Image (cartoon, helix red, strand yellow):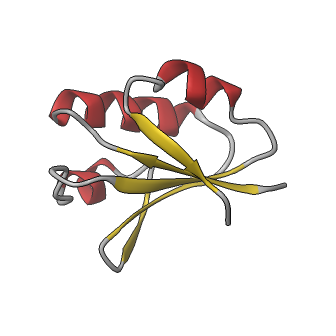
Amino acid sequence: MKRICYRVKFNNKEDLFQFNKWADSCSYNIDVRYNSKTLDGKSLIGLMGMDISNPIFVILYTDNTNDFVEKFSNIILDKIVM
């Protein structure tokens, strides 16, 4: 299993809700990093406390991120090599 990171920018809270709904349906772990904090991407309460005015990092613990890229291509800024 790989750790794959994307830098994303949520445009609004609705993007955040859609991301959380998608993340919750995934069988693998997803972390969200902003500032010095790491949050569970499946935790709506944790995500709601984030400042979405700046880009954040989404870390996917999987070998295949095609579903994420297809669903969220409008908010992905770039892929980060870790």
Rendered residue at 20%/27% (across/down): 14
Looking at the image, is 28 positioned above or below residue 65? below
Looking at the image, is 8 positioned above or below residue 22? below
- The quadrant of the rendering that contains the N terminus is bottom right
**What x and y, as percent, mark residue 45?**
25, 54
**What x and y, as percent, mark residue 32?**
43, 58
Looking at this view, name the residue that lies furthest to the top. Answer: 70
Residue 67 falls in image quadrant: top right
Residue 38 falls in image quadrant: bottom left
Rendered residue at 81%/44% (across/down): 63
Rendered residue at 50%/38% (across/down): 23
- The quadrant of the rendering that contains the C terminus is bottom right
Count of numbered circles in the view: 0
**What x and y, as percent, mark residue 34?**
33, 66
* Residue situated in front as seen by the camera: 10 or 18: 10
In this picture, residue 17 sits left or right of residue 32: left
Looking at the image, is 6 positioned above or below residue 35? above
In this picture, residue 40 sits left or right of residue 12: right
Residue 75 falls in image quadrant: top left
Looking at the image, is 64 positioned above or below residue 36? above
Rendered residue at 44%/36% (across/down): 76
* Residue situated in front as seen by the camera: 24 or 10: 10
Looking at this view, name the residue that lies furthest to the bottom. Answer: 36
**What x and y, as percent, mark residue 55?**
30, 52
In this picture, residue 18 sits left or right of residue 14: right
